[in-house]
Amino acid sequence: MTGARTRWEGAAVEFRLLGAVEAWCQEQQLDLGPRKQRFVLAVLALNANQLVPVDRLVDLTWPARPPRTAYHGIHVMVSRLRRAIASARTGLSDVEILTRGSAYVLKLDPLSIDVHRFRARVADARRETDDEARVHLLRRALALWHGPPLADVATSDVATMLCQGLEDARLSALEECLDAELRLGRHTAVVDELTDLAARHPYRQGLHAQLMLALYRCGRVTDALEAYRAARSRLADEQALEPESRLSTLQRAILRADPALDAPRAREPVRVLPPRRAWSPPARTADVVVEARGLSKWFGGRSAVESVSFTARVGEVIGLLGPNGAGKTTTIRLLSTVLAPSGGEFSVAGVPGSRAAEVRARIGVLPEGAGYPARQTGVEYLAYHARLFGRSRGQAARVAAGLVEQVGLAGRGGSRIGSYSRGMRQRLGIARALVNDPVVVFLDEPTSGLDPAGQREILGLVAAIASGRGTTVVLSTHTLPEVEEICTGVLVMERGRVVADRVLT
């Protein structure tokens, strides 16, 4: 798969069918025309490098009663699609719609289409014997989904017919990923996700079994048994079925507290870093921007973060490294005053965390999965947030113009955010975190969901912010190479605790 992925990453045009039908070229969205025209492209892309008869395109485009001009309409739409694709060519692309008799064929690398890339990544994951690698590949595959296939061009019936088995493949990949997560001892990290999935897919018994196991391992035995009872009742009432044997077997094992159900020890991060206190006590307190002492957070009877202590100085880039559920996001939420600590204390630029409003005035935050208003332009979005920090209209406009240039969006600052790629939105989010000229910026998984080129761009931008502005950066990641590339120090976290730390420069 490595070779195949490399070929796609060098391609100029990316086609997306898992959600809205779109085509992107070097972070710019192509104009594919009206709905029917995009639908024709979607049919060709689903059958990449295969002949699709014009008759079939007509039948699919007008399933009830095709107009007399239907065949001419198909030819016109294909002609316009050819022009749209041709406008995106950069010399690296090999994408063409060819005519072969009374049929068309979309000739391209299949991995430039998200549907085919999803299947390839899932196939790669199934060949993996290492659960950590398998989870990584499956999560990357699942991240390609932005909604139901062909969401904005086809009815659900037509989409189901054209994408037969695709939704089932997604759910199977998700179950395999969660199985691997449970084998890695990450039941705490996935229990909320499983609760939601089991509610949305009440007849997928595999998800119910995973939920029961995760609940049991979290010490919620009553909830695990209630999950079985609810699943059994629904199957009996709505499907006239009894649960599969694995569900009933799992229920009996829970009732007798079978040791075989106990969680495996969560795999420890690679301990390339010797455990030692890297930043305390500080040599010069005037340089200290962030200081945490015994920071802890409890939810009910569960510890999410426990006794986290560290300091970060001016211009440092501190990485919080660990798997899902390690406590990285909770630590960032505590330091950014989104959550109140259950124990311990912290300060930002000498301001104690108890003075939350003053802390928020000194920090910038990019949360994971941040949302953006599609209809605003990048400059409008940044100017609006600058006004929230008390800037005048003129000052806000100048701040916004300067930031879009600094983060590499100067040519797109006047474009609507809905036309931005994920990488562009991440850069905009970083710019948003800088509108108040903060002394420290907290970035939660800033490279999540980006391809390798996009990840490198974001990491380069983060390093430039720290070195060029003197801004301290605290970022979370589950990827060791990211830490090694730009961080000056790292905290390795596991189950809410710091298990290792080290200065890297």
Image (cartoon, helix red, strand yellow):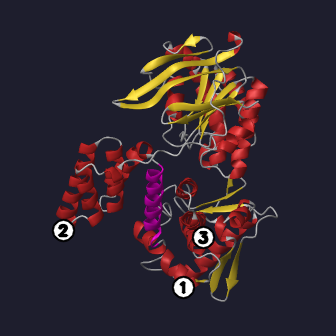
Q: Classify mark 3: helix, strand or loop.
A: helix
Residue 336 visible in the picture: no
Seen as rendered, the residue at the extreme bottom is 101
Dot 2 alpha-carbon crowd within 10 angstroms: few under 14, some 14 to 19, many 20 or more: few
What distance separates the C-alpha of mark 3 from that of mark 2? 42 Å
Rendered position, 238 above or below 68: above
Rendered position, 32 above or below 367: below
What distance separates the C-alpha of mark 1 from that of mark 3? 15 Å
Q: Which stretch did the figure color magenta?
A: 164-184
* Labels 3 and 2: the sequence-earlier one: 3
Q: Classify mark 1: helix, strand or loop.
A: helix
Q: Which residue is mark 1?
A: 55
Which disc is residue 153 wearing? none
Q: Amino acid at mark 1?
A: Asp
* Labels 1 and 3: the sequence-earlier one: 3
Q: Give the quarter of the figure containing the N terminus.
A: bottom right
Q: Give the quarter of the figure containing the C terminus.
A: top right
Q: Amino acid at mark 3?
A: Leu
Which disc is residue 240 wearing? 2
Q: How many marks?
A: 3
Q: Which residue is mark 3?
A: 41
Residue at the image position 60 percent from the left and 74 percent from the top: 44
In percent of width and height, residue 172 lies at 44, 64
